[in-house]
Amino acid sequence: MLFVREINRDNWINRQQLDAVCVSDLNNSDNEISVWEVQPNLSDIDDIALAVMMRRDRVQEITIVFLDSVELNNKYNISMHQTPGNSNFTAMNAKHNNFVVPTFWEMGYLTEHIQEKLQNPQANTKYYSEPKMKSLLFAAYQGQRIPMDVIKRNGKFKQALKSMGVAF
């Protein structure tokens, strides 16, 4: 199965070696790393990117890296723990899972695996600019896939939509 994980580009790209900064970018909770399942043909990648971004309180750029759970399990014995997401794009929360990383070894293996993926960023990552995230938010709002109360609760999401001509 194919999953994505958000990364901070500055913590990974153009690094000469794996270091504590890379590992710390994979901040975890209870020895689990948050990931989101995507369709193999990437037909839902924009919705997943929007769900990842909507865990925050404002619209901003994101970078995601593609990870194959079967490969990670076979290579490093990294397993899955199905856990619903906590995104404001609630329609996507069922696509959330966690990779279980019980020890520093698994964290290191996962960090190393991501670093290997970043050797070919065109094939293994996807970058979304802030304007692109705004347009995805706008499309989801127009398609009534994000409830009005979610937008009204979050002033920054509302402000982003207002900048695109939405009247509230």
Image: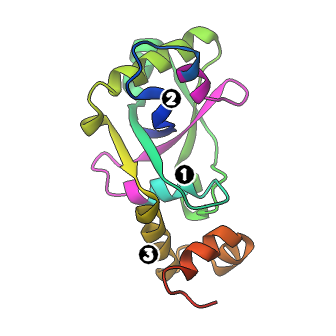
Q: Which residues are magenta?
A: 22-46
Q: Is residue 39 magenta?
A: yes
Taking the spot 70% from the left edge, 72% from the top edge, the residue there is 155
Viewport quadrant of the N terminus: top left
Q: CA distance from mark 2 to mark 1?
A: 18 Å
Query: In the image, what residue type sits under mark 2?
Result: Asn
- Considering only vertical position in the picture, is 133 above or below 49? below
For disc 3, the marked residue is 139
Name the residue nearer the viewer: 100 or 20. 20
For disc 2, the marked residue is 11
Residue 2 in view in this figure: no
Frontmost of labels 2 and 3 is 2
Q: Position of residue 153 (x, y in %)?
A: 74, 72
Horizontally, is 136 left or right of 116 in the view? Answer: right
For disc 1, the marked residue is 52
* Res. 68 image quadrant: top left
